[in-house]
Image (spheres, helix red, strand yellow):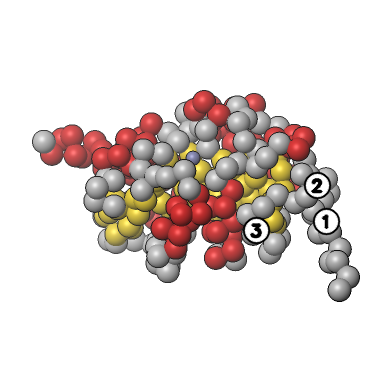
Amino acid sequence: MAALPAERSPSLSGPERTATNAELLACVRALAAQGFAPATSGNFSIRVDARSAVITVSGVDKAEATAADLTVINLDGHSFPSGALGGGRPPSAETPLHAQLYRRFPDVGCILHTHSRVQTVASRVFAQAGRVQLQGYELLKAFDGITTHDTTLEVPVLRNQQDIPALAAELESHLADGRLRGYLVASHGLYTWGRDVARARRHLEAFEMLLACELETLRWAK
Ligand SMILES: [Zn+2]
């Protein structure tokens, strides 16, 4: 049987793609300046099409991320053989977690994974409970699909592990929740997403604020 032709990576250089990448990069740099990605942590991606996405490469100072720090991935979680951009550097080690969300939710266009202090502390405080319940906040309306404060948004807290496929498997049971807008990984950080960069960032800022409120409320309750 003849070998299948090698898969070609999508272009990163068309005008529309360049603009979308620039929007992601501007978001990444701004978030890094706000303390969301200390010490080269965090990873960020946007969908290209049904089969591929662009993601930050590993080990980059996100405050100075440029187009050379992006690479294209297949949504099976692997790099295209060409390595695309990124100078042949590998995509983030957590790429399979991005690919999982893009595969599962066709309307997800951007995923932001960050390691802020608030997220990290909240992920430890709520690790044993396995979830954070955000209830009654006006700011819940910042999340797509939520139109009232009078509701509860549940944020799962997964056990941290270096085995990324195992982490993805643990998340799988939560993906059936149509209201899932993000999740925490204990002692690690937050994943959230949206239809586009602006919506994903709005969700991230809302989570940051609400998790800070939960922690502050606990302190006052003592
Ligand atoms: Zn991480």
Amino acid at dot 1: Arg
Farthest-out residue, right: 2
Q: Earlier in the sequence, mark 3 or mark 2?
A: 3
Secondary structure beneath dot 3 equals loop
> Cα distance, mark 3 to mark 2?
15 Å
Find disc 2 in the rendering and name its residue. 82
> Cα distance, mark 1 to mark 3?
14 Å
Secondary structure beneath dot 2 equals loop
Residue 175: x and y in percent read: 44, 64
Farthest-out residue, left: 222
Amino acid at dot 2: Ser
> Cα distance, mark 2 to mark 1?
8 Å
Residue 23: x and y in percent read: 67, 42
Amino acid at dot 3: Leu
Q: Are marks 2 and 1 in contact (CB under 8 Å)?
A: yes
User: What is the quadrant of the C terminus in the image?
Assistant: top left
Tag of residue 75: 3
Q: How many marks?
A: 3
How crowded pointer 3 is (Cα within 10 Å; few <14, some 14-19, many 20+) is rated as many
Find disc 1 in the rendering and name its residue. 8
Question: Residue shown at 78%/44% (left/top)?
Answer: 84
User: Can I make out residue 86 in this image?
Assistant: yes
